[in-house]
Image: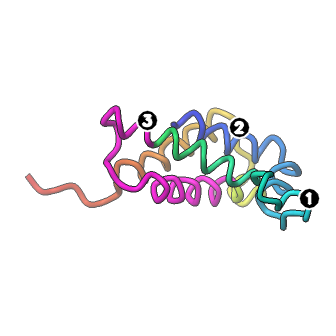
Amino acid sequence: MKQQVVAYARFAVQRPGHYQVMFLSEPGAETTGASVPSAFQSLVDMMVGTIEEAQRAGVIKTAPALEIALSLWSLVHGLSTAVASNRLGPLDDPVLEAIVSRVTDHLLYGIGRPESS
């Protein structure tokens, strides 16, 4: 799952024009028909499938996979948009991968205060 999240962020940074057209612009009439899934819907479907696999493997909690997918997408989309628009300054690939990985961990494993011993 992390590899997919990192790939999404990497795509936003390496191809900001494509990223903007796919995820930040209004869909054109030719891409809104019922038989043509949007880039967003295709991404969500792939994420839901990956999350369901992780749930079956006991890696993440059992909750509606779509809710987890939307939470994860919202996080990585916001981060990717900030990085692609240089809001965080230029980031080389290893730094980008590390940031995306840690931010994803915060979502998947929590940011709550550790319980006291």
- Residue range in magenta is 52-80
Residue at the extreme front = 35
Dot 1 falls on a residue whose secondary structure is helix
Determine the CA span between mark 3 and mark 1.
Answer: 33 Å
Residue 16 position within the rendered picture, expressed as x and y whole percent measured from the top left: 83, 50
Q: Which amino acid type corresponds to the residue marked 1 in the rendered image?
A: Glu
Residue type indicated by callout 3: Glu
Q: Residues within 10 Å of mark 1 (few under 14, many from 20)?
A: few
Q: Secondary structure at mark 3?
A: helix
Amino acid type, label 2: Asp
Give the CA separation, mark 2 to mark 3: 31 Å
Tag 2 residue: 92
Q: Residue at x 32, y 49 (%)?
A: 62
Residue 76 is inside the magenta segment: yes
According to the picture, the residue beneath numbered tag 3 turns out to be 53
Q: What's the mark number on residue 30?
A: 1
Q: Position of residue 114 (x, y in %)?
A: 22, 55
Report the predominant secondary structure element of the magenta stretch. Answer: helix
